[in-house]
Image: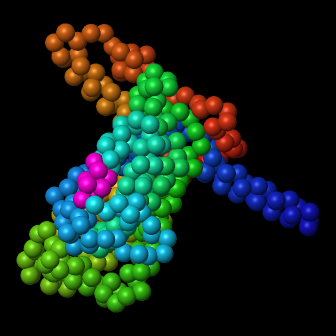
Amino acid sequence: MARTHASDSGGLLAAAVDRWSGFWFQPQPMTPLGLVRICYGLVMVAWTSALLPDLLAFFGTTGIQPEQESAPYAWGPLQIWHSDQAMTLTWAVLLLSSAALAVGWHSRLAALVVFVCLNSFIRRDIYVFNAGDGLLRIECLFLLLSPAGAALSLDSRRRRGSFWAAQVRAPWALRLFQVQMSIVYLATVREKLSGQTWNEGTAVSYALRLYDVVNITLPQWVVMNPLLMNAATWAALAVEIALGVLVWHRRLRPWVLGAGVVLHLSILVTLAVGFFSWSMFVLYVAFVSPEAAQRLVDRVRRRLDRRAEDRPGAGTATVGSATAEPVTAEPATRAELVEAPDAVTPTG
């Protein structure tokens, strides 16, 4: 009987190890990672463009922070080269590298340049940034470590003849984005519940009365209504808990992510929170299944092909078009893949 119990325990442990290995390393098409890279690159293009009007006011030699403050482990290139010309050059490099990352041109090098420039600006003047900017930095690190050009990229076109091709690789990079999202929401809920206003149900009311950061001033009968504000406060907490936990349930995932989109869009409309919500949406894309991502890609390809056919003098289909031979996911080389036993992964 003891042997049977030990055998059952060993079987459960082996199954758990298999599922854990499958979660991180069971190969799948990298189409979702390509979508994550594109979305991140577009967000960074917008982020960089938003800096331009106040670039020298924030970072210039006569701006509010003429020199970078000294802090442990916070060195940056702009700490040494802090002239106005250095700021402008760094801004231009960041804009170009963000665009290169979006289209997947030398993706890993582009991610490295974005990471260095982004960190340089954040460390140059920490007082003009918030948690959303810090999250963009973490996401860029994930892309830098990942095979970001394995799908939907000019790198893929250069190596395999089609922009739309997707390699089949271990999804550990996507898992980093997914786990990061859970950590963000669960840490946020923990921090909120350690205070007073969220437990009392008044936090949303206070936020909507911070008139220096609101985009829309709501009527007093709304922001001072106890029933509405209690419901909004506790609903926000419930959505954040669901995004941290229930998002891993395959059937509940679309509903949970949809609730998160509504939550962040309401924040964007009412409060000036910078790029925080957009950085969170990048994490949402990591939960798109390979099948759903491929359907989206095929729909975009068909639409682009129809537009190309409607143009005067349109020729025959080219490589990578929806009317040419379909592009299927291609496995990477044996050295690029990390094999693992079959397992059911949370992505689906």
Q: Is residue 261 above or below residue 110?
A: below
Residue at point 49%, 32% (across, down): 166
Residue 284 lies left or right of residue 87; in this view the side is right
Q: Is residue 47 above or below residue 153?
A: below
Could you tell me if residue 133 is visible in this image?
A: no
276 and 109: which one is in front? 109
> Which image quadrant is residue 235 in?
bottom left
Majority secondary structure of the magenta segment? helix
137 and 4: which one is in front? 137
- Region of the chain picked out in magenta, as a range: 84-92
Whether the magenta-drawn stretch holds residue 89 is answered as yes
User: Where is residue 31 drawn, in percent x and y?
Assistant: 46, 38
User: Where is residue 314 drawn, in percent x and y?
Assistant: 23, 12
260 and 121: which one is in front? 121
Residue 109 lies left or right of residue 255; in this view the side is right
148 and 331: which one is in front? 148
User: Where is residue 244 drawn, in percent x and y?
Assistant: 45, 66
Could you tell me if residue 64 is visible in this image?
A: yes
Specify the quadrant that holds the N terminus. Answer: bottom right
Residue at point 17%, 80% (across, down): 210
User: Where is residue 164 drawn, in percent x and y?
Assistant: 41, 29
